Amino acid sequence: MGRMADLPHAAPLNAALRLQVRGVVQGVGFRPTVYRLAGRYQLHGWVRNTSWGVEIWVEGRAEALAAFQRTLREEAPPLARLEEVRAEDVPAQGHGDFTIRASTPQEGAYQLISPDIATCPACLSEILDATNRRYRYPFTNCTHCGPRFTIIADVPYDRPLTTMRAFTMCPRCQAEYDDPLDRRFHAQPNACAVCGPQVTLEDGAGQRLAGDPLAQTAALLRQGQIVAIKGLGGYQLACDATNPAAVRLLRARKQRPHKPFAVMVTDAAALEQHATLSAAERALLASPAAPIVLCRWRESSPLAAEVAPASRVIGLMLPYTPLHHLLLREVGRPLVMTSGNLSEEPIARDNDEARRRLGGLAAAFLTHNRDIYARYDDSVWFVPAGGPQPLRRARGYAPYPITLPEATTPILASGAAWKNTFCLTRDRYAFLSQHIGDLENAETLTHYEESIALYERLFRLSPQAVAHDMHPDYLATRYARALPGPHVAVQHHHAHLAACLAEHGVTEATLGVILDGTGYGLDGRIWGGEFLLGDGRGFRRAAHLAYLPLPGGEAAIHRPLRLALAYAQSLASELPLPLALAAIPATEREIVAQMVARGVNTPLTSSMGRLFDAVAAALGLCDVASYEGQAAIALEMAATPLAEHESAYPFALVAQGEVQQWGQVAHLPPLGQAFALNVAPLWRALCAEHAAGRPRGEIAARLHLTVAEMIVTTSQRLREATGVARVALSGGCFQNRLLLALVLPRLNAAGFTVLTHRQVPCNDGGLALGQAWVAHYTLKGA
Ligand SMILES: [Zn+2]
Ligand SMILES: [Zn+2]
C-alpha cells in the first residue's frame, strides 16, 4: 500500500488526445498559443492547420492534458474564435517533442475567415517608439491585428493567396514569421519599412509629391483641403472636421448635402471631448472591430456643425490602422472620414479607379502599393435602449458568420435594393456579406457580383437555391431570378422578422413588429407598418397601418411635402392645411390632389416610415429629403423631453376582415381577424395642436409616444387572440433611439419578451439573413 502511495499519479503516464478546432483559428496566432501551452504542460505531439481549422495531437500525463484542454480556450489569442473543439482519446504514439507541422489542404473543406482587425496595443506602441524598427511604419501588423478579409483572394490563408504576395519578407521579418514564440509567427501580412508596402502622396493629376507623405498630407488637411486616403477596404475622403468650409466643400464635391459624416479622433481621451459616452459605447469604440458609433454629441465639441447638420448625434471612431494612427497624430485634429465615392457609388478600391472617380473630389491622394481585394466600408453601430445594434455591418464583422439554429443546404439570398448585403449559407453558418450599398447603378452591381463570387470561393460554396425579395423590379431580384433555381420569393417584412429570429436562434412563433419605409406586400401594395405573427416557416399579417396614398410612388421618399399633402387630404380634408403645406404653390397642391383622387401613379402604402416623413413635413421640419430616413431623423432630433403626464394621440385599432398569410401557417395560432391601425384621429389632433401653436418639439415627442403606444396596444390585442407573448422589433424605423426608449419599457412592463437585433442591422442591411432563413424552411417543407 505504502509503495502505491509513493506513485504521484495513478493515471497512465502517456495518455494522448486528438483535438479538432473549428472557428477563426488560422492567421490569428492560434498555433503559437498551442505550442506555448504544450511547452507549459510538458506535452509532446504536433499542431497543424487543415482546410477546416486546426488539428492538435498531444501526449503526456492525463491531468496535464486536461489542463491543456481547459487553458486552450481561456488563453486563445484575442482574434481566435473557437466555434467547436472536438476531443477524442487516442493511443499515445510516443512523440519526443512538440512541433508545428505543414498544413494539409482538403478538397471542399472550408474555414472561417477573420475580419480585418484594428491595430493592437503592441503594434501601436511599436510604431510610436522612435527606437523600434517599425517606428512610423504604416503597415505594421501581427497575428493579433491587421488586414485579413480585405487581402484574401482564396484559402488556405497563406501569403501567396493574399495581396501581400507582391512583397518578399526581409530576413528580420522572415525570422519573426518563422518563430513560433513570436507575435508575428505566420502573420501573413507581416512587413516592415525595408520589405513591405509604402505610402506615397500624389496630386490630383497623379504626380508624386516630394517630402514625407504623412507630414505633407497633414499639412494639406490643416489647410482645409480634401485628401483621398487609401485605407483598409478602399479609399476614404478626409478633411479637417473642425473646419466648416472644408466640410462644406466635401459635401458639395461628394454631392451629399445632408447625410451625416463620421469623424475619426486620435484616441479614447479625445472621444470624450466630442460626445457623452456610455460604458457600452466606449467598449464598442475601443473594440478590435473599432466601428463608427453614433454617440450623443457634446455642445462644447469643436467639430463643425456641418459634419452632421441639425443632429444631436455624432458618428465617432478611433484609428484602426497604423496609417490612421500616424495621420491623426500628425494632423492633431479630428478628421471627417467618409467613403471615397460619389454618393451611392461603391467605395473606390484600386489606385487607377480612385484617380478616375475621385479626381475631382480630392486635392491629393495618400496612396500605397498594397492592393485591396475586397471593398470594405466602416461599420456603424449605435447603443439604444435594449443594447448595442449594428446599423451597417462591414469592417471588423464580415465575413464572420451568424450561427443558425439548424444546418441548411447552401442558399444564396440576394438581399434588398438599398443598403444591400447578400447572404450565403452552409451548414449552420450564415455568411452575411459586408455592406454592399444601394443596388441602383452598374458599379454597385459589379461589386455585388464580384463579392458573391468571392464568398462562394472562400467558403467552397455552391448555392442549391436562391432567395430574393418579392419586389419584381429590384436589381437584386432580377439578379436572383436569372440564376438557376429553385427560387424562393420572400416577403420583405417577413424577411426582417426571420432575420431577427435567426440571429437569436428562436424558432417559435413570434409577433414581428416590423416598421420601415417600404417593402413589396403580398397584395402588391407597399407595406411598412406591419404586425406579422410568424416564424421562418410563414406568417399571418395580424395588423398593419391603414393604407394611405403615396403620390409619385417610391419617389415620395424625396418629396415629404407632397406626401404630407396626400395624407392631409386623406385623413383630414375638412381641416385647414398646416402652414408648411399651405405654402406649397396652388398648382402643385392641385396636382397632388388629382393624383390622390384618381389614384394616378399613387399606390397605397401602410408604411410607418412615410407616416414619420409626412408628420415631419407637415410640421415644416423637412421639405426635401436627400436620403431615405432624413425626415424621420429630423423628427426624432426635433423631439424635446416629454412631460410626465403626456399621453398619446388618439388612434383606432379596427377589425379588418380576412387575414393575409404566406408559407406554412398551419402550426401558427389562428387569428379570427386582422386589424388596421387608423391614424386619422392622430393626424387631426396633431394638426390641431400645431395650428394652436404648440412647439414642434413637443408634438414630435408626442408622436413618438403614440407610435410606442400603438405597438403596445396592438401587441396586447394580438396576445389576447393568440397567446404569443414574444415580440421582435425590426425594420428601419427602429434605428430611432427615442422610439426604442419609449417602447421597450412599455412592452416589458406589459409582460412581453422583446427581441431586438444584436448581430445584423434592423434596416435592409439585415434582410438577406431573413430571406435565407425563410428559404431554408421553404425548401425543407417542400
Ligand atoms: Zn498587432
Ligand atoms: Zn521586413
Image: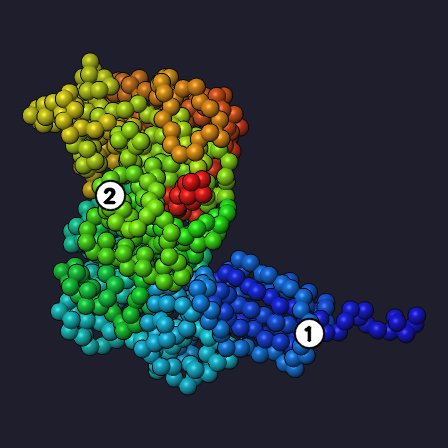
Residue 494, how many percent across, how many down?
Answer: 38, 36
Residue 133, how many percent across, how many down?
Answer: 40, 80
Residue 377, how many percent across, how many down?
Answer: 31, 56
For label 1, the SS is loop
Up the image or down, 467 lies above or below 115; here it is above
Seen at 25% across and 24% down, the residue is: 548
Residue 92: mark: 1
For label 2, the SS is loop
Q: Amino acid at mark 1?
A: Ala
Up the image or down, 651 lies above or below 371; here it is above
Q: Nearer the viewer, residue 649 or 399?
A: 399
Up the image or down, 25 lies above or below 287; here it is below
| Left or right: 313, with 10 as reference point | left
Q: Is mark 1 within 8 Å of ligand 1?
A: no
**How many numbered tags mark residues here?**
2
Q: Are marks 1 and 2 in contact (CB under 8 Å)?
A: no
User: To which residue does mark 2 refer?
Assistant: 474
Residue count near mark 2 (Cα–Cα under 10 Å), binned few <14, some 14–19, many ≥20:
some
Q: Nearer the viewer, residue 679 or 214?
A: 679
Q: Nearer the viewer, residue 769 or 461?
A: 461
Name which quarter of the figure residue 289 lies in. Answer: bottom left
Residue 150, how many percent across, how many down?
Answer: 34, 64
